[in-house]
Image: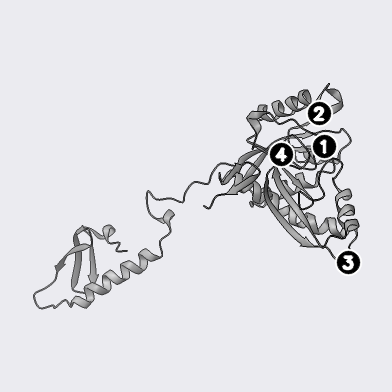
Amino acid sequence: MLVLSRLVDESIMIGNDVAVRVVDIRGDKVKLGVNAPRSVTVHRTEIYELIRQENQQAAQLRPEDVPGIGAPAAPPPIKLAVLASGGGTTLQNLLDRIADKRLNARIVSVVVSRHDAQAVARARSARLPTEVIPPAAFGDIAAFSERIFQTCEQAGAELVCCAGWLSLLRIPDRWFGKVMNIHPALLPSFGGKGMYGQRVHEAVLAHGSKVSGCTVHFVDNTYDTGPIILQRACPVHEEDTPQSLAARVFDLEKGAYPDAIRLYQQGRLRIEGRRVRIASR
């Protein structure tokens, strides 16, 4: 790449007697004017050296160094609503990933299904808009679900992330493909009603499984059956307890959930029946 445009009509000295001036630049042709006493000879190699130096300088330029060409603007953060029912460790993980800039997101609403859930304290400590909406306050799942999604909509959420959410939801058509969950096992194994938290890891060990992991999936109207976005796996050791296995699986969850959110944010997820296609960049 030849960058000499900044030299047009400027003179640059070669030695003490010769001034080289760029007269015109058209395509890849450069017209030079040379001002010098008749007794001075300008070698072609000196002109080439001037051009070589310009090319070296150009190679070191960053986009933001060139007027009118700045660094591309970062996309706006995706607005998340987080649903929780328990300790809020997944909520905290999302907060941590946002804080360390590995997730370009903003949590605009936290909905908790139990007044005594630790997630309430975590959310309020982070000064997040928080509302407790217990399912027992509603006559049926449809009314409960509608209230949940109205709350998310009022907050301006673009994606709903279930984070240890234990209540069954009826997903409105307008939110289909916009609600995610993370499960601490490799679905479709060890999922379904009542399979959450330590119960999952106890079942994995009781079954003698050699591999476990986590699954991020879109949520449908039943427990843990929505289309799978991505999975991460880890070995199950002979000496594992439910607690040690849970810790290893959660280490996977900490990266998997932000990765799935990022794919959604980039518009790379496409649902085709039971499958989620991940488009290349």
Relative image position of residue 84 (x, y in whole percent): 79, 39
From the viewer's perspective, is the residue at label 4 or at label 2 nearer?
4
Any part of residue 118 in sight: yes
Q: Residues within 10 Å of mark 1 (few under 14, many from 20)?
A: many
Point out the image quarter for the N terminus. Answer: bottom left
Location of mark 2 (residue): 133
Give SS at disc 4. Answer: loop
Give SS at disc 1. Answer: helix
Residue type at mark 2 is Ile
Location of mark 4 (residue): 219
Residue type at mark 4 is Val
96 or 217, which lies in front? 217
Give SS at disc 2. Answer: loop
- The circle drawn on residue 120 is 1
Q: Left or right of 106: which side holds 209?
A: right
From the viewer's perspective, is the residue at label 4 or at label 1 nearer?
4
Residue 155, relative to residue 48: is it above or below?
A: above
Q: Earlier in the sequence, mark 4 or mark 1?
A: 1
Q: Earlier in the sequence, mark 1 or mark 3?
A: 1
- The answer to whether marks 1 and 3 mark residues whose Cβ atoms lie closer than 8 Å is no
Residue type at mark 3 is Glu
Relative image position of residue 127 (x, y in whole percent): 74, 37
